[in-house]
Image (cartoon, rainbow, N blue to C red):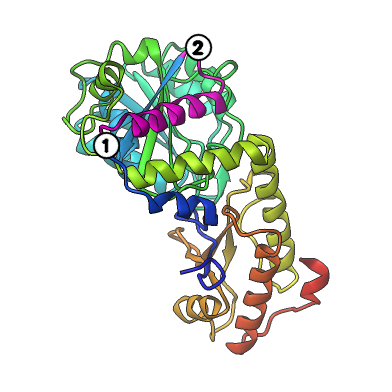
Amino acid sequence: MSQARSPILLTPGPLTTSDKTRAAMLRDWGSWDSDFNQITARIRQQVLRIVHGEATHECVPLQGSGTFSVEAAIGTIVPRDGHVLVPNNGAYCQRIAKICKVLGRRVTLIDYTEDKQVQPADVDRVLAADPSITHVALVHCETGAGVLNPLHEIALAVEKHGRGLIVDAMSSFGAIEIDARKTPFDAVVAASGKCLEGVPGMGFVIIRRSTLEKCEGNCHSLAMDLYDQWVYMGKTTQWRFTPPTHVVAALDEAITQYVEEGGLEARGGRYARNCKTLIAGLAALGVRSYLDPAIQAPIIVTFHAPDDPKYDFKTFYQEVKKRGYILYPGKLTQVETFRVGCMGHFGDAGIPGAVAAVADTLKAMGIKQQVTDVATTA
């Protein structure tokens, strides 16, 4: 199916990819073939360059969704008698806490409401009070609501106390700066189907080399042991188990386009413009964004559902989809919302088109909003 006929995905991933990225999946690859192994090596090098981690860190790829890699990072890096602090301001923070519990790692939460940032001073205070905590696991961009947490300041607080930091950067990597030369971290976890604009099916963990060297025997799982994956790749250049070859090839092509576009600055700038246009356009329709702009990440935006008895998300979703766009339901527990992503390869017309689709949908549903001229606000 051509991109012209496919709905544009305004979600936190999977997302709309380019024709070139999809075309890269049309060739079959042998998983032990030297040409394929060169693709894997190239991706690992390019990913490290994005965070300026070539001198200090290793990139270890893993099959599966991003959550697979988050679990692998916790299971590999945190010793079985370790204790993880999770600052919690959303659904993906809660998922990390659940992973820790399932893996038998002790976990402590610092709870925030879903519209608040994690505070570095709180992390500093809890670490000072509890020397048994070995690691902090932080979600950089909590896409439950769209909050951008202050990674650098939290990393400095963690380093001050000599603890390890594992960062879920699933929805920020490649668009929001993470610099290993300035921001201390043990691991940053991301995936193929997010800001790099590949297809889903592969995650990767950027791990401090000196940390990784001490991780032998930590992991609860054979398949998810990042230490073993790293050692095996170093010896053979191959994946231990069958890799998602087409996904890897697509990511290689997507990273080529990422570099051609201008890297992190250009990709992040494009998403920021999308975010600004989206919020302004829906505000003109009377649809309010949920977060304070000061903590809004330019990745996905949560909006209050229209305060109208005629509003129903399933109907709203289907009507917007008919007009060529796929949105996401809200992830909040207390407030009815929906979410719109700013990521993906859909060109400058994508967000204004989505705003127009929402305007048409509200009209079709008979929802009375304070509508102004969409063309002048988008």
Mark count = 2
* Residue 116, horizontal then vertical, whole percent: 56, 44
Frontmost of labels 1 and 2 is 1
Q: Residue at x 26, y 16 (%)?
A: 235
Sequence order check: which comes first, mark 1 or mark 2? 1
Task: Please tell me in which quadrant of the rendered image residue 268 appears.
Answer: top right
Q: Secondary structure at mark 2?
A: loop
**Residue 109 within the segment the image draws in magenta:** no
At label 1, which amino acid type do we have?
Ser
Which one is nearer the viewer's eye here, 105 or 19? 19
Which secondary structure is most common in the magenta stretch?
Answer: helix
Q: Which residue is mark 2?
A: 55
Q: Which residue is mark 1?
A: 31
Which one is nearer the viewer's eye here, 157 or 58? 58
Residue 270 circle label: none
Most extreme residue toward the right is 376
What's the CA distance linking mark 1 and mark 2?
28 Å
Q: What segment is highlighted magenta in the picture?
A: 31-56
Which one is nearer the viewer's eye here, 378 or 149? 378
